[in-house]
Amino acid sequence: MLTRDHIDLGWADKRGQSPYVNEHMTASRKRDPKMLIKTKPSWQLTDADVTPQHLYMNRRKIMAAGGALATTAFTTACSAQDSGVSSGEPAARTADGSLSFSETDYRVSDGALTPEDAVTGYNNFYEFGTGKDDPARYAHAMTTDPWSIEVTGHAGRTGIFALEDVVDYGALEERIYRLRCVEAWSMVIPWIGVPLGDVLSAFEPTSDARYVAFETYLNRDEMRGTRFPVLDWPYREGLRIDEAMNPLAFLAVGLYGNVLPNQNGAPIRLVVPWKYGFKSIKSINKISFVSEEPPTSWKQSAPREYGFYSNVNPNRSHPRWSQSSERIIGAGPFARRDTEMFNGYGDAVAGLYAGMDLDSEY
C-alpha cells in the first residue's frame, strides 16, 4: 500500500533516468522542515495579513455558525463493493450550503482575497461554454446531489463511492491559495476541503500506481458546452503520484465558507496551486490509479502549448503570450504582479522536479 510517507516510483528507471523522485522524497521528509505543515514559508501568513477587514470578520461569523453543525466521522470504508455506492451513514452536507471548517496557516504572502463575485463570475469551465461568464449563467443545470466517484486501477479499494464516503466533512480545512491561470491572470481564493493525499491513501494505491488520473462528470443534456467539439470530452487531467501526495495538493468542496458553486467545480474539484489552473480539474466523478502517464485534455488538444506537468513557470512563455507577469482579477484593470516560479510554492515542490528540464518537460 502506498501512503504519503512511502511511494515506490519505477517510472524514472523505465525512462532511463536516475530514480531521483524516490530519493528526494525520502530524504526531503527527513531533512527539509519546510515540507511540514507547521512551518511558515513565505506564502504562509495570518488571516488578517491577507484579508480585507470586512471579509475577515465575515468569515469569522461563517465559521461560528458552521461550528454548530453536526458532523460525521469519515467512513474508513472507502470500501464500497465494486457493484455500487457505499451505503454507510453519510456525513452531512448542510441544506443552506454553509460549511464548518478549521483554519490553517496556508496563506499567500501578498494581496487580498479576490472578491467573491469575481471568483464565482469569471471562470473557465468549457463544459458550459467558452465565455468567462458562461459557467455562472449555465452551470446551474448540472446535478450535483447525490454525487458519486468511481475509483479504478492499481488500488486495494476500488468501486463506486458516495461523495460523503470520500470526503470527511467533519475534518474540512480552509486554505488560501493563489490560482494562476495559463491565460496570465490570477486570483487569491479561500478554498475549503481536505488534503488530496489523505483521500488517495484511503484507497490503498499499490506500487504500480505511478500516476493518478481524474475525469470530469459528463452529461450533454446538463452541460451545453459538451455538445460542441471544443475538447475531446470528458475533460481529463492527471498527476504523478508524488505530486498528488504532496501536502499542498487539495480537494476542494467549498469556498468563502460555503459549498462550491456549480461554476467553480461543484461538488468536488482538485486544487494544485503550483500548476496552471487547468490542471485543477472540476466536478470530479472518476479517479484512476494508473502505471503510465494518463492522457490529459489540453495536452491532447494542443500539445505544443500545454504539457502534462504545466507547472507555473515565468521563464517559459506560452507560444502566444508571455508568462512573466499576470493580471490580478478583481483588483482593477491595471493591477498586475510578477509571476513567481511554481506560483510562489517552490520551497514545497521544487524538489519534485529535481534533474528535469522544465523548459522541455513542461
Image (cartoon, rainbow, N blue to C red):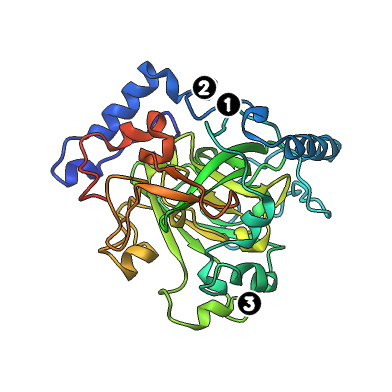
Instruction: Specify which label sits upstream in the sequence, 3 or 2.
Output: 2
Residue annotated with mark 1: 45
Q: Secondary structure at mark 3?
A: loop
Rounded to the nearest angstrom, the CA distance separating label 2 from label 1 is 7 Å
Residue 63 percent across, percent down from the top left: 78, 36
Residue 31 percent across, percent down from the top left: 36, 16
Q: Where, by quadrant of the figure, is residue 230 drawn?
A: bottom left
Q: What amino acid type should be assigned to the residue bearing mark 3?
A: Glu
- Of discs 3 and 2, which sits in the foreground? 2
Q: Residue at x 64, y 62 (%)?
A: 121
How many neighbours does mark 3 have within 10 angstroms: few (below 14), some (14-19), or many (20 or more)?
A: some
- Circles 2, 1 touching at the beta carbon (< 8 Å): yes
Q: Where, by quadrant of the figure, is residue 355 drawn?
A: top left
Q: What amino acid type should be assigned to the residue bearing mark 1?
A: Leu
Would residue 347 be found to the left or right of residue 93 on screen? left
- Of discs 3 and 1, which sits in the foreground? 1
Q: What amino acid type should be assigned to the residue bearing mark 2?
A: Lys
- Circles 3, 2 touching at the beta carbon (< 8 Å): no
Residue annotated with mark 2: 40
Rounded to the nearest angstrom, the CA distance separating label 3 from label 2 is 43 Å
Would residue 318 be found to the left or right of residue 51 on screen? left
Q: Secondary structure at mark 1?
A: loop
Q: Residue at x 75, y 46 (%)?
A: 91
Residue 222's disc is: 3
Q: Is residue 339 above or below residue 327?
A: above
- Of discs 2 and 1, which sits in the foreground? 1
Can residue 2 be seen in the rendering of this structure? no
Instruction: Specify which label sits upstream in the sequence, 2 or 1.
Output: 2
Q: Residue at x 33, y 33 (%)?
A: 350
